[in-house]
């Protein structure tokens, strides 16, 4: 909770760009349309984010805005994040060695705002667009973000890292 509070306090994009955009009619509509779409397709992730917000005692909308990135400001004609955002990944795939190296240097505010989540989630019923009943993974997480935005692996043996490329045109919903 303390890492989430700290990040929400210092994260310039959230406080200077995303929240002011959210506080407009167009921004709120973009937020609502996107949240509705995510609830329909990935309800389990919305529930996880709601639980994270409740556990950390922070407003849910702030955590959801983190996940929307530049969708809200672009929906109301504002400039989003101006910084170059992205990490670097190098993979060595040799006969006797498989190594994945990754830098996590996208945003300076993220420094010291990480944790690792190892989860095994079993649902009684299938959830979301793909009918998922079980998820088992480990992932590095930015404070207040869902697992899967940095690097990790799942129980199927899939290893991943994320290098962000932002789209020029973003559509709410």
Image (cartoon, rainbow, N blue to C red):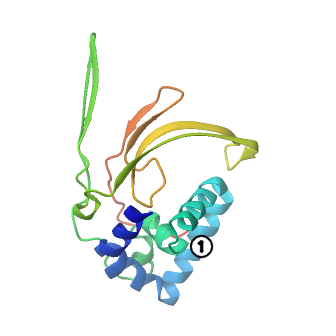
Image coordinates for residue 94, horizontal then vertical, percent: 25, 15
At 64% from the left and 53% from the top, the residue drawn is 44
**Residue located beneath label 1 in the image:** 33
Image coordinates for residue 152, horizontal then vertical, percent: 41, 38
Looking at the picture, does residue 143 appear above or below residue 79? Answer: above
Image quarter of residue 38: bottom right
Image quarter of residue 130: top right
Give the side of residue 32 with respect to residue 144, left or right: right
Q: In which quarter of the image is the N terminus?
A: bottom left
Q: Quadrant of the C terminus?
A: bottom right
Image quarter of residue 106: bottom left
Give the side of residue 143 with respect to residue 26, left or right: left
At 39% from the left and 77% from the top, the residue drawn is 18
Outermost residue on the front side: it is 2
Helix, strand or loop under label 1: helix
For the residue pair 151 and 117, the one nearer the viewer reads as 117
At 38% from the left and 49% from the top, the residue drawn is 115
Give the side of residue 39 with respect to residue 164, left or right: right
At 40% from the left and 76% from the top, the residue drawn is 74
């Amino acid at each position: 909770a303390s890492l989430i509070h700290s990040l929400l306090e210092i994260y310039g994009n959230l406080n200077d760009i995303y929240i002011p955009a959210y506080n407009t009619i167009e921004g709120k509509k973009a937020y609502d349309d996107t949240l509705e779409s995510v609830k329909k397709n990935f309800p389990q992730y919305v529930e996880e984010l709601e639980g994270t917000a409740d556990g950390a005692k922070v407003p849910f909308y702030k955590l959801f805005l983190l996940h929307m990135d530049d969708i809200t400001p672009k929906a109301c004609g504002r400039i989003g994040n101006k910084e170059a955002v992205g990490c670097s990944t190098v993979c060595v795939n040799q006969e006797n060695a498989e190594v994945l190296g990754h830098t996590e240097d996208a945003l300076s505010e993220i420094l010291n705002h990480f944790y690792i989540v190892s989860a095994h989630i079993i649902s009684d019923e299938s959830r979301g667009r793909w009918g998922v009943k079980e998820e088992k993974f480990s992932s590095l997480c930015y404070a207040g973000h869902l697992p899967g935005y940095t690097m990790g692996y799942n129980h199927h043996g899939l290893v991943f890292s994320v290098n962000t490329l932002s789209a020029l045109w973003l559509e709410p919903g």
